[in-house]
Image (spheres, helix red, strand yellow):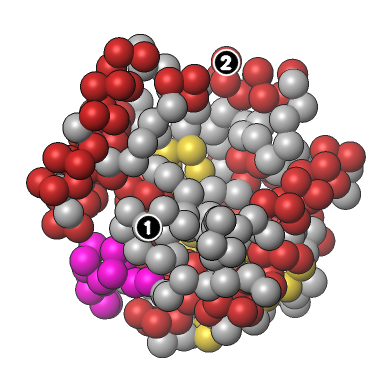
Amino acid sequence: MNNYTKTTKIWLEERFKETTESNVYFAHQPIYGFRDPNSEKYVLNRYIVTYQIMKALSHIKFDSLLDVGGAEGYKAAMIKFFFGVRVRNCDISSEACKRAKEIFKIESDTIDILKLPYKDNEFDVVLCSETLEHIPDLEAATKELIRVCKKAVIITVPNEPKEVIDYNVKNNIPHAHIHSLNKNSFDFINDKIDFKLVKNILHPLLNLPSAIIEASKKDSYSSSYSKKLIKFYNFFIPLFRFIFNEKAVCTIIKIDNLLSNKKLRHGGFIFILIKQSDCYSEKELKNVSCDSVINFKVPHYKLI
């Protein structure tokens, strides 16, 4: 584990101990539901990514899954609930693993992604969502995911401008995105898999409507928009919350899915790396609706 990774681990240990003023665990994922203030913002993007993962899994025959970099266990728990399979969570942060066990009763291991403590082909599917963009040795980490999976690996990553990545690397920001990824970023493992599917997600045209639907207060210092526009937006938040609800979230998810083949720059990708071709079905084997993804939630969890 290099110095950058050690610094990131220290940062994450503190992050996954964060609580609100009422001592509720401040979640990384929207584990408490839409617009709950005890979770991080930008939940529509998280719902889109999670829905696309469920959609990808619905085409795969599998009985076990490992979520690498799974944080507090939200996706692993959701997959267990929807697909009825054996799941395991793992993360570099021991505090994240504790939250997964406490909140979702999911077995979770503290790991180094470059040395996963699992046997070859131990899990049918390995999921690695919004994680590899943080890892210095992208190639070695990806090969570890391939090693421990038997049938398929599902990866989601953001698609960010190179200047953003260069800034993060130059300033040595812990847990920052340090890779500018594209559709060809995982071509180095083509000889280790049968075939690969890549899909665009997070269409930029949906950024503004997503912000309006989420209707969470914005700070002018952390936004690229003008102070006047931010003030205008914050003033109308009560109206946005009154007009838009979970149905609007589903609409955004469906539109993003329809726009996945457009050539405009997208905010991210989902890669489906098939190691065993007979596990994949062109037809959905199970239907997981966007409503069910949004409605998957738990009561507030207080850290003692």
| Front residue (pair 293, 87) | 293
- Judged from the image, the secondary structure of the residue bearing numbered disc 2 is helix
From this view, report whether residue 143 is shown above or below residue 25. Answer: above
Question: Residue 216: x percent and y percent?
Answer: 34, 41
- Judged from the image, the secondary structure of the residue bearing numbered disc 1 is loop
Amino acid type, mark 1: Asp
Residue at image point 55% right, 77% down: 103
CA distance for labels 2 and 1? 33 Å
| Front residue (pair 136, 26) | 26
Amino acid type, mark 2: Glu
Reading the image, the residue beneath label 2 is: 163
Q: Does residue 169 appear anywhere in the picture?
A: yes
> In the image, which disc is placed on residue 111?
none
Magenta range is 285-297
> Which badge, 2 or 1, is on the more N-terminal residue?
1
Reading the image, the residue beneath label 1 is: 36
Question: Residue 28: x percent and y percent?
Answer: 53, 55
Q: Residue 187 appears in which quarter of the rendering?
A: top right
Residue at image point 57% right, 28% down: 180
Question: Residue 219: x percent and y percent?
Answer: 43, 27
Q: Is residue 207 magenta?
A: no
Residue at image point 23% right, 37% down: 237
Q: Does residue 254 appear anywhere in the picture?
A: no
Q: Residue 51 appears in which quarter of the rendering?
A: bottom left
